[in-house]
C-alpha cells in the first residue's frame, strides 16, 4: 500500500509540473515558453522547499514552546521520534480553541510539529499520541515538502491563468507569428488548468493522509485511538473553525470545511468516515496471530 501511495504521489506531482510547463508554453507562444515553465516550476519548488515551514507557522500564529512549558507533550514527541528513528522536531503551540495539529519543514532535520490549545484540552493522552504519530509520519515521509511543493505549483498555475485571462481581455495573448492563437488551449489554461491543478493538489493531500494514518497505527499500535481522535476533531472542528491561510489547510490533520457529494473532489482530506473505516481494519489486522507474532519478534530483537 505504501509503495502504491508513493508512486501515485510522484505521478500526480509530475502531472502538476507538466501543467505548469504547458502554461508557460501557451503564455509565450513558442518553445521558449517551455523553458520559462520549467524555470518557474524549479524556482517555485525551491522557494516552497526552503520557506514552507515559516509560512505555515506564521499563517496560524504558532508560537515555539520549550520542554519546561509542556514536559508531557515533549516526552510524547521524543518517544515517538525514537520509534520512528527521526530527529526531535521543534514544537509549537497555536493559541486557538479549534482542535487541530500539523507538521511542516523541508526535511526531518528541519521539521516542526504544531498543536493547538484546543487539541491539548480535547484529546486523551492516547489519542493525542496517535495524532502526533500521524504528524511525525508526515515528517518521516517528507510529506511536508511534497504538500508545500504541490501547493506552490498549483498557485503558480492559477497565477499564470490569471495573466492569460488579463491578456485575453485587454490584448493578444500569443506573440508567435508562426501560429495563430489556439482558443482551446487558451480556454484550458484560463479555466481548466487552475481547476485541474487544485484537484491534483487535493488528491496528493488525500493520498498522503491515508499513508500518515497507517504510519501512526504502526508507531503506536493503537489505530482505534486515532479513529476516536479523528471523530472528535471532526465534530468539534465544525463548531470552532481553524482560522488561517486556506492554502495551508492540507497540512492540518483534519479539515473542518470538508464537503460531501460531488464537492468531495475539492476536499483536501479524505472523509473522516473512510479514514475511520481503514483504521478499524488496521486494528483487526494488528490483532491477527501472524501480526502479533511479528511484533513480538521485533520487540525481542
Image (tube, rainbow, N blue to C red):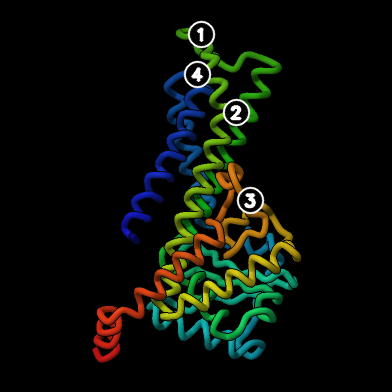
Residue at (45% x, 8% y) in the render: 178
Measured Cα–Cα span from mark 2 to mark 1: 20 Å
Quadrant of the image containing the C terminus: bottom left
Measured Cα–Cα span from mark 2 to mark 4: 18 Å
Please state which of residues 225 and 41 is positioned toward the viewer in this rendering: 225
Disc nearer the start of the sequence (3/2): 2
Residue 261, quarter of picture: top right
Measured Cα–Cα span from mark 4 to mark 1: 9 Å
Q: Which residue is mark 3?
A: 259
Q: Marks 3 and 2: CB-CB under 8 Å?
A: no
Please state which of residues 212 and 160 is positioned toward the viewer in this rendering: 212
Disc nearer the start of the sequence (2/4): 4
Can residue 225 be seen here?
A: yes
Q: Marks 4 and 1: CB-CB under 8 Å?
A: no
Label for residue 191?
2
Find residue 118 and report its horizontal and vertical position in percent.
Answer: 70, 75
Q: Residues within 10 Å of mark 3 (few under 14, many from 20)?
A: some
Q: Which residue is mark 1?
A: 180
Q: Residues within 10 Å of mark 1 (few under 14, many from 20)?
A: few
Residue 115, quarter of picture: bottom right
Find residue 299 and report its horizontal and vertical position in percent.
Answer: 29, 89
Dot 3 lies on which element?
A: loop
Find residue 273 and report its horizontal and vertical position in percent.
Answer: 54, 62
Choose mark 1 or mark 3, whichever is in front: 3
Disc nearer the start of the sequence (2/1): 1
- Relative to 128, is 86 on the left or the right? left
- Relative to 234, is 34 on the left or the right? left
Residue at (57% x, 60% y) in the render: 251
Q: Which residue is mark 4?
A: 29
Measured Cα–Cα span from mark 3 to mark 2: 22 Å
Quadrant of the image containing the N terminus: bottom left
Amino acid at each position: 500500500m505504501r509503495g502504491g501511495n508513493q508512486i501515485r504521489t510522484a505521478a500526480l506531482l509530475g502531472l502538476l509540473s507538466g501543467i505548469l510547463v504547458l502554461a508557460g508554453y501557451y503564455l509565450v507562444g513558442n518553445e521558449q515558453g517551455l523553458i520559462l515553465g520549467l524555470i518557474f516550476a524549479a524556482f517555485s519548488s525551491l522557494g516552497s522547499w526552503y520557506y514552507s515551514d515559516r509560512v505555515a507557522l506564521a499563517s496560524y500564529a504558532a508560537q515555539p514552546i520549550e520542554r519546561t512549558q509542556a514536559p508531557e507533550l515533549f516526552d510524547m514527541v521524543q518517544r515517538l521520534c525514537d520509534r520512528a528513528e527521526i530527529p526531535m522536531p521543534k514544537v509549537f503551540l497555536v493559541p486557538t480553541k479549534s482542535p487541530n495539529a500539523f507538521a511542516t519543514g523541508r526535511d526531518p532535520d528541519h521539521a516542526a510539529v504544531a498543536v493547538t490549545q484546543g487539541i491539548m484540552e480535547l484529546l486523551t493522552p492516547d489519542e493525542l499520541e496517535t495524532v502526533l504519530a500521524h504528524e511525525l509520519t508526515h515528517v518521516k515521509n517528507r510529506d511536508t515538502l511534497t504538500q508545500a511543493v504541490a501547493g506552490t505549483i498549483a498557485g503558480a498555475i492559477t497565477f499564470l491563468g490569471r495573466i492569460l485571462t488579463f491578456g485575453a481581455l485587454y490584448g493578444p495573448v500569443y506573440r508567435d507569428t508562426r501560429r495563430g492563437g489556439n482558443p482551446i488551449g487558451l480556454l484550458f489554461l484560463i479555466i481548466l488548468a487552475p481547476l485541474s491543478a487544485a484537484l491534483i493538489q487535493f488528491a496528493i493531500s488525500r493520498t498522503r493522509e491515508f499513508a500518515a494514518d497507517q504510519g501512526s497505527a504502526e508507531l503506536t499500535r493503537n489505530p482505534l485511538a486515532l479513529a476516536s481522535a479523528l471523530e472528535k476533531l471532526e465534530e468539534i472542528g465544525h463548531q470552532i473553525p481553524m482560522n488561517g491561510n486556506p492554502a495551508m489547510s492540507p497540512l492540518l490533520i483534519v479539515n473542518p470545511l470538508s464537503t460531501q457529494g460531488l464537492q468531495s473532489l475539492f476536499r483536501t482530506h479524505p472523509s473522516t468516515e473512510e479514514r475511520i473505516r481503514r483504521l478499524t481494519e488496521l486494528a483487526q489486522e494488528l490483532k491477527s496471530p501472524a501480526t502479533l507474532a511479528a511484533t513480538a519478534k521485533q520487540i525481542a530483537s
